[in-house]
Image (cartoon, rainbow, N blue to C red):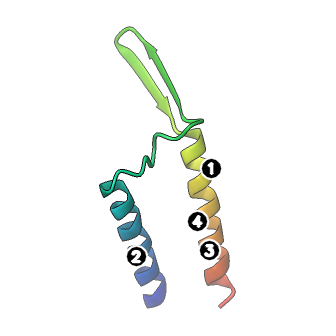
């Protein structure tokens, strides 16, 4: 359990560093933004797919141990 928590912390810190240095996480091509007057809706489709793939790979790697 300790190794898992450390790995999750490192991943979160890595994402934080990427955002700090200007990597456009969350505004990728394929993320949809709808604006109508004063209403706006943001749907992060590509970001969700990438996050899902990365988390799936991490969980597969951790479950084999």
Disc nearer the start of the sequence (1/3): 1
Q: Residue at x 46, y 40 (%)?
A: 27
User: Looking at the image, do the residues carrying marks 4 and 2 touch, with CB atoms under 8 Å apart?
Assistant: no
Q: Residue 59 got which mark? A: 3
Q: Is the Cβ of the residue at disc 3 closer than 8 Å to that at disc 2?
A: no
- Which mark, residue 36? none
- Disc nearer the start of the sequence (3/2): 2
Q: Give the residue number, with chain letter if any, for mark 1.
A: 49
Q: Residue at x 34, y 63 (%)?
A: 17
Q: CA distance from mark 2 to mark 1?
A: 21 Å
Whole-percent x, y for residue 37 in the image: 38, 8
Q: Nearer the viewer, mark 1 or mark 3?
A: 1
Residue farthest top in this picture: 37
Q: Position of residue 10 (x, y in %)?
A: 40, 76
The residue to which callout 2 is attached is: 10
Q: Residues within 10 Å of mark 4 (few under 14, many from 20)?
A: few
Disc 3 and disc 4: Cα gap in Å? 6 Å
SS label for mark 3: helix
The dot on residue 55 is 4
Query: Is the residue under label 4 in contact with that under label 3 (CB below 8 Å)?
Result: yes
Please, is residue 28 above or below residue 2 in the view?
Answer: above
């Amino acid at each position: 359990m300790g190794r898992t928590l450390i790995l999750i912390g490192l991943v979160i810190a890595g994402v934080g560093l990427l955002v700090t240095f200007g990597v456009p996480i969350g505004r990728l091509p394929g993320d949809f933004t709808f604006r109508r007057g004063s209403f706006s809706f943001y749907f992060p489709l590509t970001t969700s797919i990438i996050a899902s793939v990365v988390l799936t790979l991490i969980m597969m790697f951790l479950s084999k141990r």
